[in-house]
């Protein structure tokens, strides 16, 4: 286990990416509320942002939307709305990563950064809920969580 200063960094279990991402969100959120420095939370924050980037790029890449419309042409508008929502999530992710690079690494994370992180998590969660609702409309009765 890695320790830096007064805030110990727990080890994240290696299991499914979704479970791991949820655990990382809790860890980073806890460290941010404990007023840790970015230097102290760099490892879990970076892994979390990489998990989000990978999910958005590979799991929800353009082929996801193209296949959905190909199989269900009546869902074109819904698909376009999801693409727009995903673009907003990706922009928020990039802004968060930039903010992490611009913050002072050895001082407690600013309230602005904490708020930006929380807003990103909310936006990402809303997008995931929209994707799940979309998938339920395509495949009723199937569990996607």
Image (cartoon, grey):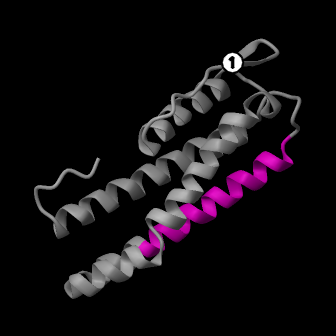
Q: Residue at x 70, y 16 (%)?
A: 8
Nearer to me, 53 or 33: 53
Residue projecting furthest to the top: 6
* Magenta stretch holds residue 85: yes
- Magenta residues: mostly which secondary structure? helix
Question: Dot 1: what SS?
Answer: loop
Q: Is residue 79 above or below residue 33?
A: below
* Magenta stretch holds residue 99: yes
Q: Is residue 57 left or right of residue 41?
A: left
Nearer to me, 34 or 141: 141
Q: Is residue 79 left or right of residue 14?
A: left
Measured from the top left, where is residue 48 in percent x and y? 60, 43
Measured from the top left, where is residue 134 in percent x and y? 26, 66
Q: Is residue 129 left or right of residue 109?
A: left
Q: Which residues are magenta?
A: 83-103
Q: Is residue 134 above or below residue 40?
A: below
Q: Residue at x 29, y 78 (%)?
A: 68
Q: Residues within 10 Å of mark 1 (few under 14, many from 20)?
A: few
Measured from the top left, where is residue 65 in percent x and y? 37, 77
Q: How many marks?
A: 1
Q: Is residue 108 left or right of residue 89?
A: right
Quarter-wise, where is residue 37 in the image?
A: top right
Q: Residue at x 72, y 52 (%)?
A: 97
Residue projecting furthest to the left: 141
Measured from the top left, where is residue 130 in percent x and y? 33, 60
Give the residue number, with chain letter if any, for mark 1: 1
Q: Is residue 100 above or below residue 44?
A: below
Quarter-wise, where is residue 108 in the image?
A: top right
């Amino acid at each position: 286990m890695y320790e830096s200063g007064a805030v110990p960094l727990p080890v994240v279990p290696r299991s499914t990416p979704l479970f791991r991402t949820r655990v990382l969100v809790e860890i980073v959120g806890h460290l941010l509320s404990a007023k840790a420095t970015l230097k102290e939370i760099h490892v879990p924050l970076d892994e979390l942002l990489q998990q989000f980037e990978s999910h958005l790029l590979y799991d929800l890449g353009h082929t996801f939307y193209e296949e959905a419309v190909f199989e269900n042409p009546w869902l074109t508008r819904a698909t376009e709305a999801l693409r727009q929502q995903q673009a907003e999530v990706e922009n928020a992710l990039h802004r968060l990563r930039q903010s992490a690079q611009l913050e002072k690494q050895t001082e407690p994370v600013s309230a602005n950064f904490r708020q930006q992180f929380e807003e990103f998590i909310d936006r990402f969660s809303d997008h995931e809920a929209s994707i799940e609702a979309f998938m339920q409309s395509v495949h009723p009765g199937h569990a996607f969580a």
